[in-house]
Amino acid sequence: MHLTVCRRLKLFADLIGRRPMSHTPTAPVAAPLGDFPWGQVQQVEYQAANSGPIVQACHAMLYARTEARFVRELPCRAWVMMQMRFDGKLGFPGGIVSDLAVPDASLEDGLNRELQEEIRLDVARFGFTRQHYVISHFCPRVNLILNLYAQEVTEAEFREIERQALTADEYGHECLGVLRIPLYTMHDGLNGFPAFLQNQFAGTSVLQVMVGLVTQDIVTEEEAHAYMNVLPRHHGYRKLFGDALVSYRQRRLPAEPPLS
């Protein structure tokens, strides 16, 4: 199990052009602005697994709508699961699929395998299928396509999934902990979700958060644009966000009847 995981982690490190960390501690260095090549990220449509030399990664947004309130006054709206990853960044559960170490039959098969390993998801009940697909983005520099899926569960099911995550094979290895997104803004206008968005996110994860929240009708598009004011403007999140929503909505338009 861990040999396979190590191969995938090495593949990920090679993709982003960095060597895995040594065991020798070094002084912390601030992440450069170009830590992820956002200027190259492109909107793409759903890709078949093993499509040429392009590496695929799939990630899952599990969420439950809730009437719960923080300190009895701030609506939580929904519980959305993310995780602290092995590299110290935040992201959705999932990872590389269809690589040479573990050949997956489809993107969804690979995603479900990753979720079993990382959060011990009961895929017989909560397995992801093509109908849960949301959006894809491609980064040419690292030759990587990042696919996002989303699935709604009940509050009771969400709590169950959280508890199960603590017993997963990769808990403490690939996944260092699960967390809920604080989907409220505190009275100072800074803490809560705006502060959360200023964390370090892996790859396109912060874009996936915003697209996921809007496409799943948890926040409005207007609210999302307001929240994105805290994100670095040079990264071009807004255009990618808008393109993703257009693509998602077009795919959900009812098919036109054939001409008679």
Image (cartoon, rainbow, N blue to C red):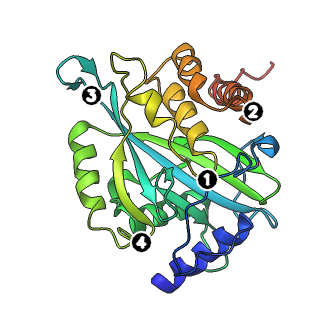
Label 4 sits on what residue type?
His
Q: Is residue 209 left or right of residue 99?
A: left
Q: Which amino acid does the dot numbered 3 rest on?
A: Thr
Quadrant showing the C terminus: top right
Number of residues whose C-alpha sits closer than 10 Å to that of mark 4, classed few (under 14), some (14–19) or many (20 or more):
some
Characterize the local packing of mark 3: few (<14), some (14-19) or many (20 or more) Cα atoms within 10 angstroms: few
The residue tagged 4 is 173
The residue that mark 1 highlights is 30
For marks 3 and 1, give the CA distance: 37 Å
Alpha-carbon distance for marks 2 and 4? 33 Å
Q: Nearer the viewer, mark 2 or mark 4?
A: 2
Mark 2 or mark 3, which is nearer the start of the sequence?
A: 3
In primary-sequence order, the first of circles 4 and 3 is 3
Disc 2 target residue: 234
Q: Quadrant of the N terminus?
A: bottom left
Q: Is residue 246 left or right of residue 226?
A: right
Distance, label 3 to label 2, CA atoms, is: 35 Å
Residue 50 drawn at (x, y percent): 72, 66
Disc 4 is placed on an element classified as loop
Residue furthest toward the front?
Answer: 27
What residue does disc 3 label?
66
The residue carrying pointer 1 sits among few (fewer than 14), some (14 to 19) or many (20 or more) residues within 10 Å by Cα, namely: few
Q: Earlier in the sequence, mark 3 or mark 1?
A: 1
Q: Amino acid at mark 1?
A: Ala
Give the mark, 2 or 4, whose residue is nearer the N terminus: 4
Identify residue type, mark 2: His
Image coords of residue 54 (percent x, y):
78, 62
